[in-house]
Amino acid sequence: MKRFTSILSVLVVSSLALSACNTNQANDQKNNEKAKTAQSAQNAVGEGTDKLLQLSDELTKALDQKDSAKVKKLGEQINKTWFSFENKVRKTAPLLYTETEKSLLPLVSGTKIEPVDQKTLSGLNEKMAVSLNKLKNFKPSKKGTANADLNKAVEQYKEYVLKQSNQLVAATEEFSNAVIKGEMEKAKKLYPNARTYYERIEPIAESFGDLDPKIDARENDVSSPSEWTGFHVIEKALWVNKTTKGQEKVVNQLIQDVKELHKKIKAVQLEPAQVVAGAVELLDEAATSKITGEEERYSHVDLVDLAANVEGSKAIFDVVKEPLMKKDPELANSIEKEFSALQRSLKQFKKGASFVSYNQLKEKDTRKISQQLNTLSESLSKVAKLLS
């Protein structure tokens, strides 16, 4: 009996040792895989950055030569190249991501306009090159665990995003049902509501590869009409073609995609710098595309999108305000005032529960709102650096 016990003890110890060994091997394998993934992402960022810097040099020459055709072509190449690796930048260097987009997005938009605005595009190109060189030399830091305040802030924001994505699914289903039933006027009224929930969490949606373009691509964002899916396909059918017919496939795909987005959001892990950078990104996009009227070009409900972007950014600021007050109360109070001023500017264009058509805004109105967006974006950039 003693001998059996002894043998059993040996077997148990051996089993535990083997189990621990297997666990260690599994952990080592997981860490190695993470390291390989991180290195792969860093390599992709490096290669993509080098390509963009090369295109930036070519754009400088094309601008000097006033070659508008070349400028337009290079703008398309810059946009395509950035799109190929931007999500890797977003995850590894969120602050540099927003800094790069602040010049890259208006640059790409500007290359499509004739006659070429050489001075403006040259300035944007120079700023983009500065950001890209920072990105080229960027080395991800191995930071410790964020403090309790920031962890709490991230958890609160995750709850906000989950709630918004859940409402997005419900609002999209309601809108889609109206389209399928041929209830065009009802669909038109429901469209802005669904858009609101999406625009509040757009940076998170954009971090999931091709889900954002599947849901939110504009007509000129795809190479062929067969690739175009999402909200704006239906928007064009409702406001331009004035029909709901033939939209069943698009509608079903849209519902599937927003449900997939909600599923991915449940599993996403957020970092403080990434969250605050998301607020900056929302405002930058609002200042470059929403305020120009190009986002909702058929329905002209651009102010709905813009207001939702501001609300999404404010939701981020609200959760980081407490830790920010401990580091820079003056900046926190200043941002609070900037948000209030911007929301007052938007409020004057409210019409019932929604907003007036974008076409009713005058140039002085869009200029004022754009300036407020840029000021707020700069202030939130300081927050990101303080809390990163």
Image (spheres, rainbow, N blue to C red):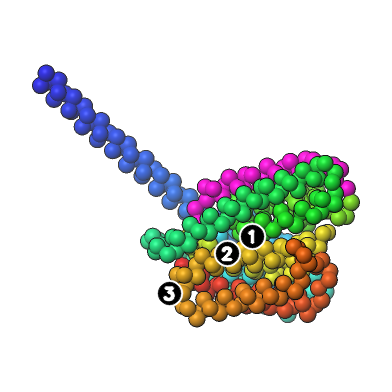
In what element is the residue under mark 3?
helix
Prevailing SS of the magenta stretch: helix
Q: Which residue is mark 2?
A: 315
Spatial separation of the CA atoms under disc 1 and disc 2: 9 Å
Quarter of the view holding residue 339: bottom right
Callout 2 touching callout 3 (CB < 8 Å): no
| Magenta-tinted stretch | 243-270
Circle 3 residue: 326
Image quarter of the N terminus: top left
The residue sitting at the front extreme is 352
Q: CA distance from mark 2 to mark 3?
A: 19 Å
Establish if 246 lies above or below 91: above
- Sort mark 3 into few (<14), some (14-19) or many (20+) by Cα contacts within 10 Å: few
Residue at image position (67%, 47%) is: 170
User: Who comes first in sequence, dot 2 or dot 3?
Assistant: 2
The x and y percentages for residue 366 are 76, 75
**Residue 251 highlighted magenta (yes or no):** yes
Q: Is there any visible trace of residue 42 in the rendered image? A: no
Q: Secondary structure at mark 2?
A: helix
> Measured along the vertical axis of the image, is residue 202 above or below residue 368?
above
Callout 1: SS: helix
